[in-house]
Amino acid sequence: MKINTLLYWKTVSPRDLDLVPPPKASKSKLSAINFARQAPATISSVNEHQQELTRNLQKVTTMWKGRFQKETSSLLTQYGESISFDWRLYKYDIAGSIAHATALERAGIITHEECKEITEGLKSIGTDIEQGSFEFDMSLEDIHMNIESALTDRIGDAGAKLHTARSRNDQVALDVRLYCRDSLNDIQENLRDMQRALVQCCKRFPDSVIPGYTHLQRGQPVLFSHHLLAYVEMFERDIQRLKDSMQRINVMPLGSGALAGSTIALDRSFIAEQLGFTEISHNSMDAVSDRDFVAEVLFCLALTGTHLSRLSEDVILWASTEFGFISLSDEHTTGSSLMPQKKNPDIAELTRGKTGRLYGNLMSVLTLIKGLPMTYNRDLQEDKEPLFDSIDTIQNALVIFSDMIDGMSINEEQTRESCSDPMLFATDIVDYLVKKGVPFREAHNIVGKLTAHAIESSTPFPEIEIQQYKEFSEHFEQSVFNLFEIESALTARTAAGAPSPENVSEQVSKWGNKLSAE
């Protein structure tokens, strides 16, 4: 699976993540910034560019020319265009338009022949976009008007009938829902791949042990697999959240018009069925202004980013010389331009950093929608770039992180040595006393004093004489020395969810079977 190298080049379907050429545009159709970068050498060439841009602006004005006596300002068109980023909605716009045309035919608004012309024309436009031969026109603002204008140019009057009983307000709401639906399905599969990579790592190193940490201080020994499986559980919650959000995404808004529907009633349930929606919206004003689902998607992705960032932090620490728990492959690390010995965990560091983008995109959309009056407002155009960016970012992170985990190895000698610290067994000594009838708080106090003695005398627990143990509690017996074996400590943790080898092996097997079946 390829990774997007440029947001602008991403195809509509994230499933393949294939690169396609960016939209073509002539000099007169560039944004204001790009237009300025062309830097024409003469005044006459500037005027020619401006004149050509003005001629193209007449196309967009024809969409609402009846109300206006003057052409739209070229500055406004350049400022308000969204085709530079919403072009990726083309597949969904075409699919929605074909379903809409079919509904128009069923309602007797267009003939069967006109519906056929529209459908074939839209499919040909889709093919041209996929092949990179379609020339997007910045003066037509967005993907909807670019496709409609091209359709009318190709098939004539039938194309001009397509927008009957439809507004760009419900059209874009439909496109974004379809886009989110497909993208979230793909992200769920990316998350499954991430889980598979972690479970495979567990299988490669089934006996590796590692200190478990609280407050970044060693606490108790656990199997490395148990630690990795914690992230498998986190990513499972991410998948379930995405699935749950589908209930609110999969609502069909088309037919809501600009805000109050249309006097031309189409069969909205039929359209929903054609597009795979499970239900239709029931309030036209809410349908065209609702971006809750976008905010919800961004929250889900931000939380997935949180989990990736936590795993990144672990990987960064583990790969450091101070820990030395893991080795990352040369494929997934970088060096220093100055220090030749360096091997940097860039994937983990970048992923940790990109989580900030995911948070920022969520806050951007929440801020965007918090003060909007009903119903549609042009502000909502600004929901797409944060949405597209978060989807790209999380998919790229999951793909490359999974690849990195596949190439990661565990330095078992180092991790076992880290687990040889006798202090890791302090809690086991407390449990030992509790099993002999000592109240927990009293046992905790006894072992706390024992720990202080071990530190002050520089005598590890296994080297303290039994007579000294008995000075702290008469309940200590020779059997206390059986506690200081890693395998014994792990085997004793048999409660459900605890890291005994048997429990962990069962969980690895369970997840392996589940992920193989999906």
Image (cartoon, rainbow, N blue to C red):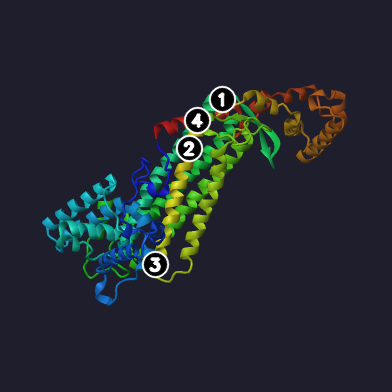
Sequence-wise, which precedes: disc 3 or disc 4?
A: 3
Query: Alpha-carbon neighbours of circle 2 within 10 Å: few (<14), some, or many (≥20)?
Result: some
Quadrant where the N terminus lies? Answer: top left
- Kindly check if marks 1 and 4 are in contact, taking CB atoms under 8 A apart as contact: no
Check residue 378 in the rendering and tell me which mark sits there, or answer none: 3
Query: Alpha-carbon neighbours of circle 3 within 10 Å: few (<14), some, or many (≥20)?
Result: few
Q: Amino acid at mark 2?
A: Ile
Sequence-wise, which precedes: disc 1 or disc 2?
A: 1
Q: Amino acid at mark 4?
A: Asp
Q: Which residue is mark 2?
A: 400
Q: How many marks?
A: 4
- What element does badge 2 sit on? helix
Judged from this view, the residue extending furthest toward the front is 42
Q: Residue at x 23, y 57 (%)?
A: 150
Sequence-wise, which precedes: disc 3 or disc 2?
A: 3
Q: Which residue is mark 1?
A: 206
Who is closer to the viewer here, 79 or 328? 79
Work out how far the residue at label 1 is from the one at label 2, CA to CA, in angstroms.
24 Å
- Kindly check if marks 3 and 4 are in contact, taking CB atoms under 8 A apart as contact: no
- Residue 138 percent across, percent down from the top left: 32, 60
